[in-house]
Amino acid sequence: MTKNEDCNCEAPAGHHGRHMNRNMNNTHGGNAVYGLGFIGAIVYYFSTATSFWLFVIGFLKAMVWPAFLVYEALKYLNM
């Protein structure tokens, strides 16, 4: 194999992008945080719901809780 001048690796020409993720360490820690937050939001919204439609709205809010969190954080920081 010859050295490829474009990406500075030993792979043959025309391989671009095939080795880019070789050394990435994907731990998926954000998925666990989102999942626990989703469960907590479901418990909170369901415990305060008094009708069927409040359960539905609570479920939808639980799916997008990070958006509420970021909005409130930015509002608190006056951004």
Image (cartoon, rainbow, N blue to C red):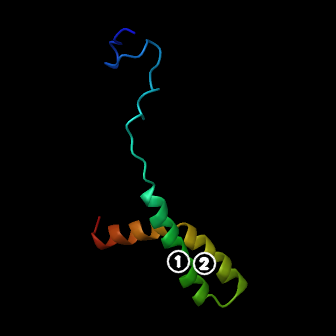
**Quadrant of res 68:** bottom left
Give the image location of residue 19, x and y in percent. 43, 28
Tell me which residue sits at (70%, 81%) in the image: 53
**Quadrant of res 63:** bottom right
Pick the residue in front: 6 or 66: 6
**Residue farthest right in this picture:** 52
Pick the residue in front: 13 or 22: 22
15 sits left or right of 74 in the view: right
Can you see residue 13? yes
- Picture quarter with the N terminus: top left
Q: Marks 1 and 2, Cα distance to the nearest angstrom?
A: 8 Å
Q: Residues within 10 Å of mark 2 (few under 14, many from 20)?
A: many
Q: Earlier in the sequence, mark 1 or mark 2?
A: 1
Pick the residue in front: 48 or 31: 31
Amino acid type, residue under disc 1 in the picture: Ala
**Residue farthest left in this picture:** 77
Q: Foreground mark, 1 or 2?
A: 1
Q: Identify residue for label 1.
A: 41
> Quick check: 72 above or below 55?
above
**Quadrant of res 56:** bottom right
- Picture quarter with the C terminus: bottom left
20 sits left or right of 79 in the view: right
Helix, strand or loop at disc 1?
helix
Give the image location of residue 64, x and y in percent. 53, 66
